Amino acid sequence: ALGGASSALPQRPVTRVEHQSMVRNFYNDQTFRSKRQKRNQSKIYKLRSFNNCCKYILINKYAVRGGNVLDLGCGKGGDLAKWEMAQIASYVGVDISDQSIREAIHRYRGGRYGFRAIFATGDAYNTPLPDILTNFQDELNLEFDTVSLQFCFHYAFINEQTARHALENISRSLKLGGMFIGTMPSSDFIRWKIRRLAPGEKKWGNSLYSVEFPEVPPKDGNFESAFGNLYTYYLADAVDHVPEYVVPFEKLRALCEEYNMELRYKKNLFEVFNKEIPKYFHRLPHPLMQSLRREDGTYGISGEDRDACSFYLAFAFEKTSC
Ligand code: SAM
């Protein structure tokens, strides 16, 4: 069964402003919805744990102890504990959803974190970072060791201008040798899925997630333009047909090089877990690992969860010159 009812995509291209307000409204509403839902009763409980586990690994692989971090699209602050584990000294979280930022502040204040944190609402892809953080400029050093974009960079590929603005913000914020890290949908996986669609089909998925293009995608999975390739993504109990954009990875890599950032790591989340877990197993929170324990005593995910998690990859780029 494909997850979710079919989406009601507009019959014309979505403008950048419409897109940003759709995304903001969706994540604002979601902040209220998720408060009412018990996490461990969700259909995607395992998948969430798996994604969190991969984020723990990526963050702890690349964060600098005592370093400072910029988290763009930080959401409700779900990664604060991961940065705590990495022993960073300071953290700046930015998100377009003001409700998510409120929740992140609440979470930070309610926890015992060993790092300083600042949160700000703003469009990280279209507004220069100093303008978003204008109220904090006296207390802030705007050069970061790590810039993190977790599960959010695909919103920047609505058009070339937005993707370039986002990369400009990211690259300018990084110190030399600093890392741009993140997780996002894999264009390799999307191409692989498109090539296996039946003729005329424009949707795939399972009971946990689905991806739907407004029109039948090119048979070979190679889109004419690198930008604006819209699909709607559904994830049970989490994302309800929100418009997203394909990020052709080789295009991202070429653009990053233009902005002085070189690829250091690219792996599907399934590979991240299998390759890195022996090293991180004992450092990760015990309940998180237990939620990934299979009946045979091994750890990981399978079946529909596996297909849903393979949709994502993790990456790291290093700032190599100014
Ligand atoms: N990074 C968080 C995590 O991994 O839990 C949240 C991920 S959530 C799937 C995507 C986030 O990106 C949302 O909180 C959304 O509001 C944010 N976002 C989307 N477009 C944005 C933009 N232009 N500027 C800042 N945040 C944005």
Image (spheres, rainbow, N blue to C red):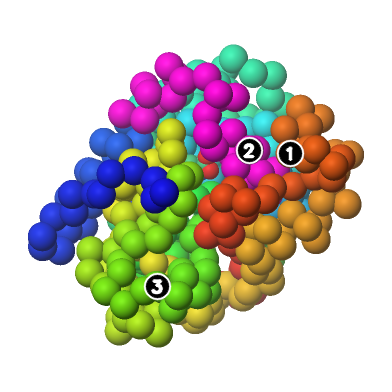
Residue 12 picture location, percent across and down: 10, 62
Q: Crowdedness of circle 2 by 10 Å Cα count: few (<14), some, many (20+)?
A: some
Name the residue type under label 2.
Lys
Helix, strand or loop for disc 3 = loop
Q: What stretch is highlighted in magenta?
A: 29-54
Name the residue type under label 1.
Leu
In three-dimensional space, the C-alpha distance between marks 2 and 1, rounded to whole angstroms, equals: 6 Å
Helix, strand or loop for disc 2 = helix
Residue at x-position 44% and y-position 78%: 195
Q: Name the residue under label 1.
A: 292
Residue at x-position 49% and y-position 23%: 105
> For the view shown, which residue lies furthest in the left direction?
11
Q: Which mark is residue 46?
A: 2
Ligand 1 image position (quadrant): top left
**Which image quadrant: the C terminus?**
bottom right
Residue at x-position 31% and y-position 69%: 201
